[in-house]
Image (cartoon, grey):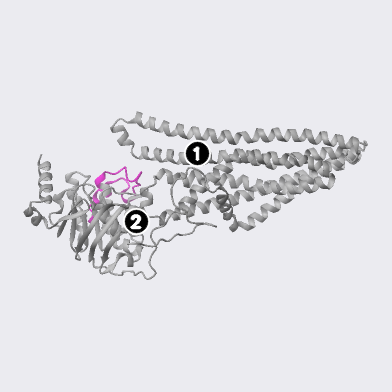
Amino acid sequence: MSNSTNQKQFGPGSRHRNHGPAEKAKDAKGTFFRLLGYLHGHVVYLIAALLCIVIYTLCSLFGTQMIGIAIDDYISVGNFSGLQFICAGLIGIYVLASLFSWIQSRVMLKLAQDVVAQLREEIFEKFQSLPLKYFDNTTTGELMSRVTNDVDNISNALNSSVSQLLQGFLTIIGIMVMMFAMNVPLTIVTLCSVPVMLLATKAITKRSRNYFLAKQQRLGELNGYIEEIISGIKVVKVFSREENALKDFDDKNNNLLQVSVRAELYAGMVGPIMTAINNATYAVVVAAGAILMVTTGSVTLGMISNFTIYAKQFTRPFNELANQINTIMSALAGAERVFQVLDAEDEPEEKTDVVTLTSVEGDVVLQDVNFSYEAGHPILKHINLYAKPGQTIAFVGPTGAGKTTIINLLTRFYDIDSGKITIDGYDIYDIKRENLRKTLGIVLQDTYLFTSSIRENIRYGRLDATDEEIKAAAKLANAHEFIRRLPDGYDTELTDGGSNLSQGQRQMISIARAILADPSILILDEATSSVDTRTEVKIQQAMQNLMKGRTNFVIAHRLSTIKDADLIAVINHGEIIERGNHEELLAKKGFYYNLYTSQFKEEIV
């Protein structure tokens, strides 16, 4: 079954790319212009910043011009009274320049933060629309690195680099006009250094760009590993694998160190090279000016002074670009990784004529369903199943047989390859996705609770629920008593996914949340496999309360918990090999019989 995909567009100039880590920046120029596209929505800030830069540049240019005038017209002739007015004018010009430079920096800071906030919002919104398989294939630490480190690198570049590029461009144009107006031969001498600087910068940045992207990628890998180890720290300590964890961390950290050193090494080469070229340019300008002054008389001492200052100001944008090269390269590498997330394929597109089910009886049919996570490796083969309203269907079988995969298909976390799944006669692809998932309630083996109060975690099942409805759901889930005994009761704050509660208590809160949601179809995925027998009894009672009047799908770990199921489907190697109720399957003395009797013996022992 093929489904078209909805490529949601984010940001200016957004275009589709296949997700996947790149070894080098494939389109630095395209990434740069796409990033600049985010400035389109901030025209007022850009105009204000540009105006400040223009005033600052004009002040710098005229200040330099006044220095030449002061040398030729006042200092050289000894007119020190007139020099006082020139100095006062220079002070006023440079104070004005400093003021507008400060205003420009504040404006660009505001602009940069707005753009960064927009990027973070787009990434988080994108997370909500990405299919589950994307998160299965990408570590949490890697995703966090893109939202934090990569976006911060973009912020740093926007704070400084954009304004410096604008200021540099205007400075270059203004200085060229002023120099050509004063003396053409001396201007040509000054400009001879520009091609050398451009060639040197291009050669170095070509090498450093790849290292900066590799640095961001390895930083993401390191963050992913740290997040994984912290999440599984109990397992690390139980098996005394601290040394192994340290070794793996050192390997990843050293890999990051190596590419970081290379990236910074190449970026650091630009500054000294530019300084050497600049110093050589000053010497050449002074020498050429002196020769012209002696031979032609077309150059004055003040003009030579102006040209040396203009030469410094002219090369400053190139120097600043050189000094900012690591910031710019990091920003481009980070932006490319951010755009990879934004360009990833969303969940399959909804049909235009989808329906919204207002009341669901719970009639579920799986007709010749086939599915594979990877092409050529089938997970489910020709699954046929029919659940009548109010029935309980149990899935049993060895690990990896495909039980949970059926649940993932029912919820449309993944799309089937072929076949059909219907609810109350409607193909699930004809039902609005949000409506479909609200119809289903899921209680998983590994519960997830948010860092919030118990009350708000239960309310997550239905956000408009009252406190009384929350307590009623907790009572049906057998959670009210233990919650009531907690120091803060329902206002008890949970930490780190509910780590301050037992596994059984977390499961009962999860059941209360599902009860509050009041789904028409319930899915229980080995909900009692990780608790003790006494807690299991309480959870079983809670689940019985939850299952009343609903169509239920149960993935069973302990077969003793599904004796009363209306139908038990035995799955092995992706196929239903046996079906029937508990007594019928035991009478067949087949796969289920062997599975049940072996488990029963283990429980007796």
Badge 1: residue crowd in 10 Å (few <14, some 14–19, many ≥20): many
Magenta range: 476-504
Q: Earlier in the sequence, mark 2 or mark 1?
A: 1
Front residue of 234 and 188: 188
Residue that protrudes farthest toward the front in the picture: 376
Q: Is residue 82 left or right of residue 1?
A: right
Is label 2 in contact with label 1 (beta carbons under 8 Å)?
A: no
Residue that protrudes farthest toward the left in the picture: 587
- For image coordinates 64% across by 57% down, the residue present is 44
- For image coordinates 48% across by 54% down, the residue present is 121
Q: Is residue 2 left or right of residue 476?
A: right
Q: Amino acid at mark 1?
A: Lys
Q: Is residue 602 left or right of residue 203?
A: left
Whether residue 518 is visible, yes or no, is no
Q: Which mark is residue 201?
A: none
Q: Which mark is residue 460?
A: 2
Instruction: Give the residue at mark 1.
Output: 215
Q: Is residue 134 left or right of residue 547?
A: right
